[in-house]
Amino acid sequence: MDPVLAELISEGVKILGPALIAGCAAYFAASLQFKATLAQIREANEFAARQHLFDYYKDKQKQLSESYNELSNTLGQVLGVNAAARTDEGDESIQNMVSGFDSIAQLHLDAAPFEISLTLRDMRSKKLEGMEEFERLASRKQSLEGLHLGDDFESKKATVLSLLELYGWLKRCNQLLLEKEMDLLFSKYDVGRA
């Protein structure tokens, strides 16, 4: 081999060798940094999504509590007005109040199957279908099919009490969902589980 060519190759290796090694090292470092940044972004997005779900269940629990209190007051008034209407059949203003309160009770009765379906769906997604609360809520949905707001006081009373019990169960099931979401939200940060 020509000594000039050999020296040229030797000089080329001296120059390109370290540059190639530095290039490979830079590539692997950038690749690792990219993967670490991607993992951080995924973790931040996962935390934000879980936090959003937690806030959703928290707001839903607050709404259910407020609705339950309103429902309790309103349905108590339904029963009271209906009891008064039994003793005073001729007063048209009382009959109009009875009709108005009956409409409110009917609204809650009509909304109940949808509320139950949403809660059962959420409980399934969180793997809570084996719990007693899930079973009771599912059975309440089936018993709603035969429930209606009748014309007589006893029928209305039974329907109102069933609705109060049902919304109490909805509140309890949503509390379980809230607790489950809170566990999921903070499970990565629980040192005892690691």
Image (cartoon, rainbow, N blue to C red):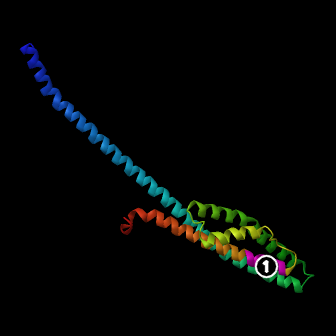
Residue at 43% x, 65% y: name it: 186
Span shown in magenta: 154-162
Question: As drawn, is 41 to the left or to the right of 5?
Answer: right
Q: Quadrant of the N terminus?
A: top left
Decide: is 149 above or below 19. Answer: below
Answer whether residue 158 is magenta in the image. Answer: yes
Decide: is 106 above or below 157. Answer: above
Q: Out of 78 and 48, give the one closest to the viewer.
A: 48
Answer whether residue 165 is magenta in the image. Answer: no
Q: Residue furthest front?
A: 1
Image coordinates of residue 53 in percent, x first then y, are 53, 60
Q: Residue furthest bottom?
A: 87
Predominant secondary structure, magenta span:
helix
Image coordinates of residue 24 in percent, x first then y, are 24, 35
Q: Around disc 1, counting alpha carbons within 10 Å, would you say few (fewer than 14), some (14 to 19), or many (20 or more)?
A: some
Q: Secondary structure at mark 1?
A: helix
Residue at 79% x, 80% y: name it: 157
- In the picture of the structure, the residue carrying the numbered disc 1 is 158
Residue at 68% x, 65% y: name it: 116
Image coordinates of residue 19 in percent, x first then y, are 19, 31
Q: Where on the picture, by quarter, is residue 131?
A: bottom right
Image coordinates of residue 123 in percent, x first then y, are 59, 64
Q: Residue furthest top?
A: 2
Q: Residue furthest left?
A: 3
Decide: is 38 above or below 153. Answer: above
Question: As drawn, is 179 to the left or to the right of 166?
Answer: left
Give the total of numbered labels. Answer: 1
Q: Where on the picture, by quarter, is residue 126?
A: bottom right
Q: Quadrant of the C terminus?
A: bottom left
Question: As drawn, is 136 to the left or to the right of 28?
Answer: right
Q: What amino acid type is highlighted by mark number 1?
A: Ala
